[in-house]
Amino acid sequence: MIPAQYLGALSLEQRLGDPWLESNLLSWPSALALDEQDAFPEAAVTGLNALGLPQAYVPHGLGGQFRSSEAFVALGRTLARRNMSVAVAYSTMLWSTLGWLGGTDQQRRAIARWMMDNASFPCLAYSEADHGADLVSNRLTATLNEDGSYTLNGEKWPINRAIRSGFLVLLARTSEGNHMRNHSLFIISKDQLNSQRYYYLPRVKTHGLKGCDISGIGFRGCTIPSNCLIGQPGHGLELALKGFQVTRTFCAALSLGVGDTALRIASDYAARRVLYGKPIDQLPHNRDVLANAYLSQLAAECVTIVAARGLHVCPQLYAAWSSVTKVQVCRLVDHACTELSHVLGARFYMRDQQNVGIFQKFYRDGAIVSIFDGSTHVCLDSLTTLLDTLVRDTAQPEASQCLHALFDLEAPLADIDYSQLTLFSRHGDPLIGQLPHLLGKVQALEESDHLPAATLAELRHLCQAFVEQAQALAEQIRQTPRQAGQQEARRIGYAQRYCAVFGVAACLGVWLYNRNRFGPFFASGQWLLGLLERGLAADFGHGVLAPERVDALLAQLAHQRSANHMLSIFTWPLASAGSAEQLFPSIIKEDACDELNLS
Ligand SMILES: Cc1cc2nc3c(=O)[nH]c(=O)nc-3n(C[C@H](O)[C@H](O)[C@H](O)COP(=O)(O)OP(=O)(O)OC[C@H]3O[C@@H](n4cnc5c(N)ncnc54)[C@H](O)[C@@H]3O)c2cc1C
């Protein structure tokens, strides 16, 4: 069974056809061929435009189809599992969020039209070569003129789609000094720019995402109209940070797509490669790696589900939850990919052998997720400033009510209220605060066909231990409050463990509230036991999973591979072998999009 919010992604998947069929634009052979040439995936992007995909990025109130973050993440994952270059090239559409967040009604409508009528892509022009993550020190200026227009001077680099974009989301310095009000945000259509006054910096040769347009843009006395300003003058950094709260959450879709293909390729290879008279997927170490990688993928999926739903339920927590999500999902998937690369042996180092080259591409491309949109360490650093509040006042009575909306995948969700995003949440973290409540639910479970007494007893025991570990961490944080203005490596460690606690809590919640919906493997809780066995370690070690957990995980992995399903807690059918894409429907565009049911 798969919840209704995933139907749009299922439909998109079928439209894209078999990823092994070379003639399909979003196939793995095509992704590799373009990668070898450092070529932009132009045809695939055009095909997705023809399907009406830009509508998925525009809120339904503005005529688009965006309603559910969970549905949106599922679409991103569907693209990312096929070709990260396409997914990342397309993902810049998401920067329109800054318009929804800070724009006037007129500005929002104009942006929605650019995207839906012209398939115009934005680029995000924040970074500067000399300042990196230190946005407050950036030097590109927007000088206010007497008539209300602004004049731009300076350069932004490196920027995804700087050259291949129709409009810019630009952060520009509007006052001197290094303080939170020294930048303003502008959204500018390139039509509004004097072509003599701006220029491009050449495409950068990158380690992964080789076809993507990673370039830059510069301005020399380039005037832009006053109506390009988004929000209040001086509020640019605040808007930028709030925008990251949304986009960091959605980055998880990219990691999930990478994790799926990496594990699929590695496990297919391990099943074919015979040594010592048997396939290498029977070697104990490889069994352990494959089982753990699958478990990491399921855990990353649960974190993503809770994070996507949470944007609708508790947006006021996203200064923290967006960073937690990005850190934890990246860590789970990236570590699994590194371990899987060893399963491939020497083939990992070869680009054209036995379908393994595609693994390398995903491994290279996937590494970007922990770098852009705020690196893992930037996210952890920002979490260190929030930890004291997160562990304070965690027992709010209203918190238990939000658990149902967060975890029950059939619970309806309200639209995201962007006005609730805030830089410094004053609230304790309900997910952590409600762990005793979740533990109580585990203690109250009764054994059943799918949940034998022995498993239930182990679950109760390990859940109890997990809650104690989480409470000990919270107490440690309370005992060593942050010293204002100081960055401490110790608190980065706390933040890392906090992300791990969040990850396990998300899995526990998703399991408890949906136990009997997703089939016997999900219901059995073996996977959850495995996660609890792994504890709060940053990465999975070997020999930690009990043998029966390894057996259960590998059996389900084998089942999903042979059934051609997404590697997921759901039953998520993929495009069938040999199926051709249907990217350019003969019906008119609107009909195609309705059929896609993107919302
Ligand atoms: C493929 C690609 C696409 C990109 N696309 C865009 C785009 O579209 N738009 C855009 O604006 N930018 C984009 N960037 C830039 C990207 O967002 C970078 O994260 C940003 O420029 C900082 O990178 P840097 O190398 O300058 O790192 P630096 O900021 O110099 O950081 C160096 C090191 O210090 C660490 N560090 C920095 N600050 C902190 C902190 N506060 N706490 C702890 N550790 C810290 C970092 O994690 C890193 O390890 C892109 C980059 C790449 C590679």
Image (cartoon, rainbow, N blue to C red):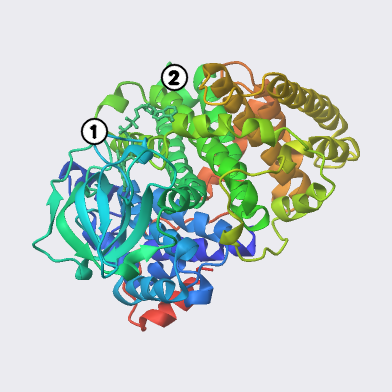
Rendering coords of residue 261 (x, y %): 42, 42
Q: Which amino acid does label 2 sit on?
A: Gly
Q: How far apart are marks 1 and 2 (CA)?
A: 26 Å
Please tell me whether mark 1 sits on a helix, a strand or a loop.
Answer: loop
Q: Which mark is residue 74?
A: none
Residue 370 higher or lower than 589, as above or below: above
The residue carrying pointer 1 sits among few (fewer than 14), some (14 to 19) or many (20 or more) residues within 10 Å by Cα, namely some
State ligand 1's quadrant. top left
Residue at the spot of label 2: 277
Q: Which of marks 1 and 2 is in front?
A: 1
Does the residue tagged 2 have its C-beta within 8 Å of any atom of ligand 1? no
Residue at point 33% right, 77% down? Answer: 117
User: Image quadrant for the N terminus?
Assistant: bottom right
Q: Which residue is farthest front?
A: 146
Q: Which amino acid does label 1 sit on?
A: Arg
Residue at the spot of label 1: 351
Residue 75 higher or lower than 353, as above or below: below
Query: Is 217 situated left or right of 434 in this image?
Result: left
The numbered mark, 1 or 2, whose residue comes first in the sequence reads 2
Task: Name the residue nearer the viewer: 256 or 562.
Answer: 256
Residue at point 67% right, 28% down? Answer: 530
Please tell me whether mark 2 sits on a helix, a strand or a loop.
Answer: loop
Residue at point 64% right, 23% down? Answer: 536
Task: Name the residue nearer the viewer: 395 or 139.
Answer: 139
Task: Name the residue nearer the viewer: 277 or 331.
Answer: 331
